[in-house]
Amino acid sequence: MFAEEKDMKFTEVQLQGYASPIGKTEDEKCKNALRMVRDALAFLGYSDYGRIEEAIHTDSFAYSLKMSTSSSREVRIRLNAT
């Protein structure tokens, strides 16, 4: 074993795992977080008028949701998984 390898904090396998895209479990966590924010804002009078979260990009776990109140206040929620 080389001295440099002995002092490394991460293995090659760990680094490959970090570089891989997030899985479906992470996607569900993102959607759940967005739903929780949506529910909290609904309690304050905001509504999504039946809209569901929409994917911002087809190849990533990034979502957007637009909500508004009856008095024309709007908020757009964006959530990106990293």
Image: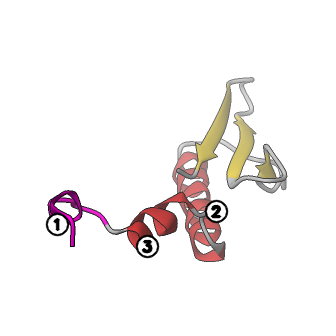
Q: Which of marks 2 and 3 is nearer the N terminus?
A: 3
| Distance from the alpha carbon under mark 1 to that under mark 3 | 15 Å
For the rendered model, the colour scheme is secondary structure
In the rendered image, residue 75, in percent from the top left (x then y), is placed at 65, 31
Residue drawn at x 84%, y 52% as measured from the top left: 58
Please tell me which residue lies in front, 2 or 79.
2
Q: Which amino acid does label 1 sit on?
A: Lys
Q: Do the residues labelled 2 and 1 touch (CB within 8 Å)?
A: no
Verify whether residue 65 appears in magenta. no
Q: Which residue is drawn at 60% across and 45% down?
A: 79
- Mark 1 or 3, which is nearer the eye? 1
Q: Residue at x 51, y 52 (%)?
A: 40
Question: What amino acid is at disc 3?
Answer: Val
Q: Main secondary structure of the magenta part?
A: loop
Residue 19 picture location, percent across and down: 53, 58
User: Disc number at residue 31?
Assistant: 2
Q: Position of residue 81 (x, y in %)?
A: 57, 52
Residue for badge 1: 6
Q: Quadrant of residue 33?
A: bottom right
Q: Residue 62 carries which label?
A: none
Where does the magenta region start and end? Answer: 1-10
Return the residue at label 3: 13
The residues tagged by marks 2 and 3 sit, at their Cα atoms, a distance apart of 29 Å
